[in-house]
């Protein structure tokens, strides 16, 4: 199927629905901790990072130092750097320049997973649609949560945070079921994540642990299941008749040297 804007919008709908619930929870929490509705919404539409926003909100409300915020956000969001580097190998040749700078904001865990699962190279129009739908869901979800913060019971608000995990499983399970290498990489990342979380002697931030799991699992996948080298698009295949003529000339020259 063609990688166009409309297909990107459609593929982004499941992500949008998942983001609505999580951002709704952020809006509730932000207002509950003292932010105004527009401050909570502004944070969401300028960041689009769930773990980073929740951690940043806690630091702000507890009066944390600016350097603490910088360090926390660096490690929590470091995985997006790795995702962006990987995604540059998947986009088509027209997806470059200013478009990359602007749309890089749309590299989230779920959007990255959907983009990388495409069979064809990701176009600029497709990625714009894929980012736009979840972005609107993230912004409107935060706004709704902030405005309804005093109405929705706290127990109901906590339930919304679970939806994003179900959404992410819905993205990776079909791909892991159809591909043995993907399944192995997912299992290694999951096992390592559990070890880091439950081991009493390991103390890492969530962002650093996610980055470590991603690097180790990706390194295993690259080592164990490397992708075949693709031919250079600029190189034209050598004509068959030319190959034969070169071969015949070589054989003839060898024969002449032998007789001489």
Image (tube, rainbow, N blue to C red):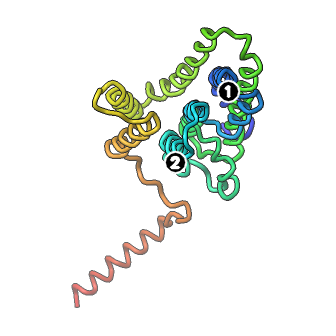
Residue 144 location, x and y as percent? 75, 21
C-alpha distance separating marks 2 and 1 = 22 Å
Q: Nearer the viewer, residue 27 or 98?
A: 27
The residue at the point 47 percent across, 64 percent down is: 240
Mark 1 is surrounded, within 10 Å at the Cα level, by few (under 14), some (14 to 19) or many (20 or more) other residues, namely many
Of 123 and 150, the residue lying toward us: 150
Q: Is residue 80 left or right of residue 6?
A: left
Instruction: Answer with left or right where residue 127 lies relative to residue 178.
Output: right
Q: Residues within 10 Å of mark 2 (few under 14, many from 20)?
A: few
Q: Which residue has dot 2 on it?
A: 81
Q: Position of residue 54 (x, y in %)?
A: 58, 30
Asked whether residue 3 is in view, the answer is no
Using the image as rendered, state which of residue 17 and residue 51 is in the foreground.
Answer: 51
- Is label 1 in a helix, a strand or a loop? helix
Q: Residue at 60% across / 8% down in the picture?
A: 155
Q: Are marks 2 and 1 in contact (CB under 8 Å)?
A: no
């Amino acid at each position: 199927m063609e990688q166009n804007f409309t297909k990107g919008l459609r593929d982004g709908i499941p992500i949008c629905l998942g983001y609505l619930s999580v951002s709704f929870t952020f809006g509730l929490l932000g207002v509950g901790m003292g932010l105004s509705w527009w401050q909570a919404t502004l944070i969401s539409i300028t960041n689009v990072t769930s773990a980073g926003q929740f951690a940043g909100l806690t630091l702000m409300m507890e009066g944390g130092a600016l350097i603490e915020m910088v360090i926390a956000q660096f490690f929590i969001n470091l995985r997006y750097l790795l995702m962006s580097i990987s995604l540059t190998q998947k986009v088509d040749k027209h997806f470059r320049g200013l478009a990359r700078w602007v749309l890089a904001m749309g590299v989230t865990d779920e959007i990255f997973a959907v983009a990388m699962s495409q069979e064809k190279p990701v176009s600029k129009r497709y990625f714009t649609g894929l980012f736009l739908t979840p972005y609107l869901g993230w912004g409107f979800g935060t706004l709704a949560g902030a405005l309804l913060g005093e109405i929705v019971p706290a127990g109901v608000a906590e339930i919304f945070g679970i939806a994003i995990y179900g959404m992410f499983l819905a993205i990776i399970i079909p791909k892991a079921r159809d591909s043995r290498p993907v399944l192995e990489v997912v299992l290694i990342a999951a096992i390592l994540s559990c070890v880091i979380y439950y081991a009493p002697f390991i103390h890492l931030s969530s962002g650093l642990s996610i980055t470590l799991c991603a690097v180790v699992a990706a390194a295993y996948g690259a080592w164990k299941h490397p992708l075949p080298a693709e031919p250079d698009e600029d190189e034209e295949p050598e004509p068959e008749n030319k190959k034969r003529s070169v071969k015949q000339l070589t054989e003839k020259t060898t024969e002449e040297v032998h007789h001489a």
